[in-house]
Amino acid sequence: MSSESAPLLSLAGVNTHIGPYHILQGVDLVVPRGGLTMLLGRNGAGKTTTLRTVMGLWHASAGSVRFDGADITSWATPDIAQAGIAYVPENMGIFADLTVRENLLLAARSGPIDETRLRWIFSLFPALERFWSLAAGVLSGGQKQMLSIARAIIEPRKLFLIDEPTKGLAPAIIGNMIEAFRELKKTPDTTILVVEQNFLFAKSLGDAVAVMDNGRVVHSGTMAALAEDRGLQQRLLGLSLDQHQ
Amino acid sequence: MTAPAAPALSAPAQRRDIAPLLLVPLLALAALPLIGDVSTWVTLTVAGLAMGMIIFIIASGLTLVFGLMDVLNFGHGAFISVGAYTAAVLAPSLAGLMQTDSLALNIVALLALIALAMAVTGAIGFAFERIIIMPVYGQHLKQILVTVGGLIVAEQLIVAVFGPVQIALPLPTAFRGALVFGDIAIERYRLIAVVVGLVIFAAMLLILGRTRIGLLIRAGVENAEMVEALGYHIRRLFVGVFVAGSALAGLGGVMWGFYREALTPSMGMDVMVLVFIVVVIGGLGSVGGCFIGALLVAVTANYTGFLAPKLALGSNILLMALILLWRARGLYPVAKR
């Protein structure tokens, strides 16, 4: 398999324990290069743990995590980030005492922020330009989410791991997020893995999908196929689109 | 990077929290009628500010060490003693600079002693972090045990080398005496301590506010995990902060030793009670809070020592209780994840 056709990220038989709890119980997940893969599942299925295991924030007790041809299973978190993975945690991980500018400056590891890219980010999230010099702690929930995503994309990365970007956001903000993700998808050599509970959001953006349950991936395929199969949605996610539309 | 100009649109409210800044001036004003005599009040206040600056120098490193890695380092007091004893050992070799009326030469001697003491305590701090702290990351009970153990071992090593009795650390000649303004006499060394404290505070503000390393430290104090997820090795940063904090404790030890002009093996342990009160009052991990907390603690100790000596011992505990009743996480709590 050529490096171009090989998946960017793959997890094979990954097990993760948190204290006495066995959370991931043999996760097999493939994230192809390019496009947006959605990781869905009920609460407690292991989605967040999967992202944190990829980032090395919790280490796998068994199995392997491969990224861009390298086995990163036992790598330290900063080394994984330096390899080209950006991470937006579920709680956004904003530095509340730092200004919007300082939050972005810190994320730009390679030096000063590229002005063109900053303008592009401001076009996605205009509020960030408006509140540039304010402490991030005073932003609204939606603005903090915008900042957390802006921080991830302030420099080009090979893979973006984004955990529940719509959590707690108003519908108008979610619409803004969808547009931002569409723009992000257009950038070359960009792969995105999003954990999401909002099926409509997932359906409108996802190219591929994986569904987790009880610490395992129980379904993989295209988002379009899952979106059309209500029976499968009901079986995998316990949801009915009628309740969401 | 060129910061884009912020358009004049509505922004979230962001109020400056100035209430803690008013505490020291209000306390000083409240003490004036109780003390009665202005010259005594000035003397006590300046002495309190000088002592507060020294405590700040010592406590600032500790608060960053705690904020950055949640490390409870009771061994910090050892660096105070080591710094002071280093100065005492080296001072005789600088007698020519110290025993002269030239203020400039005296300052050179003080700076040389400070630099050497900081180098020694910084180096010991590096070894202390690697050997004693690193194995107990994330284990608070073990941190208390091993760092208290480290403090006791350091104290006993000083006893073994220098004996249990106090030794003298005389002030350089030009630092002695007082500046007299009418009825008011202000000891010269106290002014020097205030200046050194302000310089250190300004340098820390500059580093924390204007440099990338400072940005990383501030971010790390808030959310170390996220700093790592952005691609920075927080533990390397922590080692640097620990070494700097140890060196600052060494500097504080030199200043404290000259302030008392006498050293005892337990001097580090003795001052740690005040240092911990300052760190808690200020807000764990907050340098600004630490600065105000140190001044509050020292000024309160001086006023109560004069007005009600029997209350002096408990006054700082009472102060801490009052502050925590007002602000449970300290004067300037750091926004922790």
Image: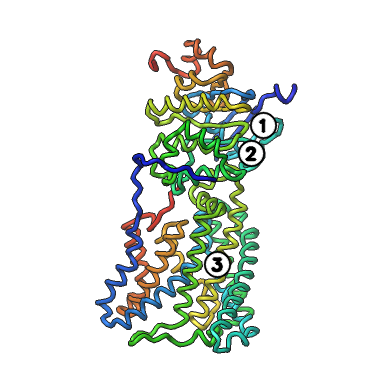
Label 1 sits on residue: A67
Q: Which amino acid type is shown beneath numbered disc 1?
A: Phe
User: Would residue A187 be seen by someone viewing this image from the given angle?
Assistant: yes
Chain of residue at mark 3: B
Instruction: Chain letter for mark 1, please.
Output: A
Q: Nearer the viewer, residue A8 or A59?
A: A8
Marks 2 and 3 sit apart, C-alpha to C-alpha, by 34 Å
Q: Which residue is mark 3?
A: B248
Q: Which mark is residue B269?
A: none
Based on the displayed image, in which of its 4 quarters is residue B131 positioned? bottom right
Is residue B166 visible in the rendered image? The answer is no
Whole-number angstrom distance, CA of label 1 to CA of label 2: 9 Å
> Dot 3: what SS?
helix
Seen from the viewer's position, the closer of residues B276 and B302 is B302
Q: In x, y percent, where is residue B105?
A: 58, 83
Quarter of the image where one finds residue A153: top right
**Tag 2 residue:** A80
